[in-house]
Amino acid sequence: MATLHDKVPAGLDRKETEVYRRLDPNKLPRHIAIIMDGNGRWAKRRHMPRAAGHRAGVTAVRSTVETAARIHIPALTLYAFSEENWKRRPPTEVSFLMRLLSRYLKAEVPTLNKNNIRLDYIGRQHELPEDVQERMQWAHEATAQNSGMVLTLALNYSARSELVDAFRSMVNSASQNGGLEHLRIDEDTVSRHLYTRHLPDPDLVVRTSGEMRLSNFLLWQLAYAEIYVTPTLWPDFRGVHLLEGIAEYQKRERRYGGLNHAHDAPDGLTVGKS
């Protein structure tokens, strides 16, 4: 007879195990998206440069990714670098972030392979520095044969730009297949032209640092996602915080605009979407 300990995935630490035991492993999210926020505030509180916050954030990425893989989350997407970052951050900080990304990819590929994680990207990659693109392609190819969790890094990403690119792609496809008069646009068509077309829509989106906004992240895909906001700044975020977010997710009833059948509204009462 299997014991409770047999059901805990290998590799979880004591705190993670305590939270995991409260979870229903049959109701884990298929896809978790995370808005990683708070590096600058973390550094400021410690009277350190912003770069120190970004470096500390790498440790949070490693812990979160490994925990997600260990509990067999099929897909994890991290909002690493927005398109707006190019315009609103000092060039020196942007340059540092690009170097940090290259170092992360080089250092983490062995860990990704050890955990059977396949690496992918979304965003306008062609606008990134050429050497960064080359490192990204190398890391992608180095993990391409893995069959476990798909880790997607959103780099130079903007949800509005993604939608613009999707509509451009639809128009281009139609023009090459009978002309624009044959163009038919519905939700399935849009989804097939998004960067995330090979992924299920996220079930859960996590935002760190307590901010209550989506920041132009996966606006189409998050239509019915559960939102979990934690005051924890990203450099302090660890696998146990991810598990706490999943525990909160499992307490919620996902209705997709329908009714909670255990508490159906009385006849004649208008019920809005929730």
Image (cartoon, rainbow, N blue to C red):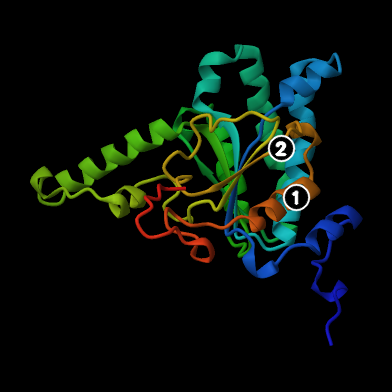
Q: Quadrant of the N terminus?
A: bottom right
Quick check: 229 left or right of 48? Answer: left
Q: Is residue 111 visible?
A: no
Which amino acid type corresponds to the residue marked 2 in the rendered image? Answer: Thr
Q: Give the crowd class for mark 1: few <14, some 14-19, many >=20 residues within 10 Å.
A: some
Q: Position of residue 203 (x, y in %)?
A: 55, 53
Whole-percent x, y for residue 107 in the image: 75, 42
Up-down: is 150 above or below 98?
A: below
Secondary structure of residue under mark 2: loop
Q: Residue 114 vs residue 27: left or right?
A: right
- Residue linked to disc 1: 244
Residue for point 44% across, 58% down: 265
Write the residue at 61% across / 55% down: 252
Assess disc 2: are there few (<14), some (14-19) or many (≥20) residues with their C-alpha within 10 Å of its C-alpha. some
Label 1 with label 2: CB-CB less than 8 Å:
yes
User: Is 220 or 235 nearer to us in this picture?
Assistant: 220
Q: Is residue 25 rendered to the left or right of residue 205?
A: right
Judging from the image, what secondary structure is the residue with disc 1 in? helix
What amino acid type should be assigned to the residue bearing mark 1? Glu
Residue placed under numbered mark 2 in the picture: 230
Instruction: Identify which residue is drawn at 79% across, 38% down.
Output: 59
Q: Rounded to the nearest whole Å, what is the CA distance between mark 1 and mark 2?
A: 10 Å
Res 124 seen here: yes
Above or below, 226 relative to 26: above
**The quarter of the displayed image where residue 180 is located:** top left
User: Tag on residue 50?
Assistant: none
